[in-house]
Image: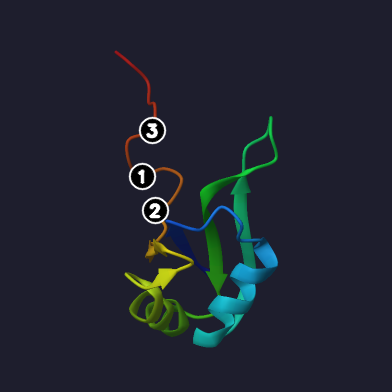
Amino acid sequence: MAHKLFIGGLPFSTSSDRLRELFAQAGGVESATVVMEQDTGRSRGFGFVEMTTAEEADAAVKKFNGQEMDGRTLKVELAKSAGAGGGRGPRY
């Protein structure tokens, strides 16, 4: 099972391939995606990386959280599951 990381503060020029290369320094990367704006095709400045193991995910957080990349500070943390957080839920 892959362990998904949220990556914030990405330089807008970062590609999914570049993100994969960077995080491969911390271990096995199953997928790496930079989130793009649908209308313009421009990066939204964040993305997700799925690491192969929990240990590699932890290593990636320790290695890259707070690091600078092209003048921007990365925020790396375990991604919250789709059901968690401040999403819109039913109103009663």
**Which secondary structure lies at badge 3?**
loop
For this view, does 35 lie left or right of residue 59? right
Residue 79: quadrant of the picture: bottom left
Measured Cα–Cα span from mark 3 to mark 2: 11 Å
Q: Position of residue 49 (x, y in %)?
A: 55, 65
Q: Is residue 38 above or below residue 31?
A: above
Measured Cα–Cα span from mark 3 to mark 1: 7 Å
Point 32% across, 35% down: residue: 86
Image quadrant containing the C terminus: top left
Q: Is residue 32 above or below residue 88?
A: below
**Which secondary structure lies at badge 2?**
loop
For this view, does 83 lie left or right of residue 11? left
Image quadrant containing the N terminus: bottom right
User: Could you say which disc has been placed on residue 84 in the image?
Assistant: 1
Upstream in sequence: badge 3 or badge 2: 2
Residue 85, can we see it?
A: yes
Badge 2 crowding class, 10 Å Cα cut-off, few under 14, some 14 to 19, many 20 or more, is few
Pointer 2: what residue? 80
Point 61% across, 57% down: residue: 13
Pointer 3: what residue? 87
Badge 3 crowding class, 10 Å Cα cut-off, few under 14, some 14 to 19, many 20 or more, is few
Q: Position of residue 72 (x, y in %)?
A: 41, 61
Residue 38: quadrant of the picture: top right
Residue type beneath disc 2: Lys
User: Could you say which disc has been placed on residue 15 in the image?
Assistant: none
Query: So how many labels did they put on this image?
Result: 3
Residue type beneath disc 1: Ala
For this view, does 52 lie left or right of residue 86? right
For this view, does 65 lie left or right of residue 70? left
**Relative depth, front residue between 75 and 14:** 14
Q: Position of residue 26 (x, y in %)?
A: 49, 85
Badge 1 crowding class, 10 Å Cα cut-off, few under 14, some 14 to 19, many 20 or more, is few
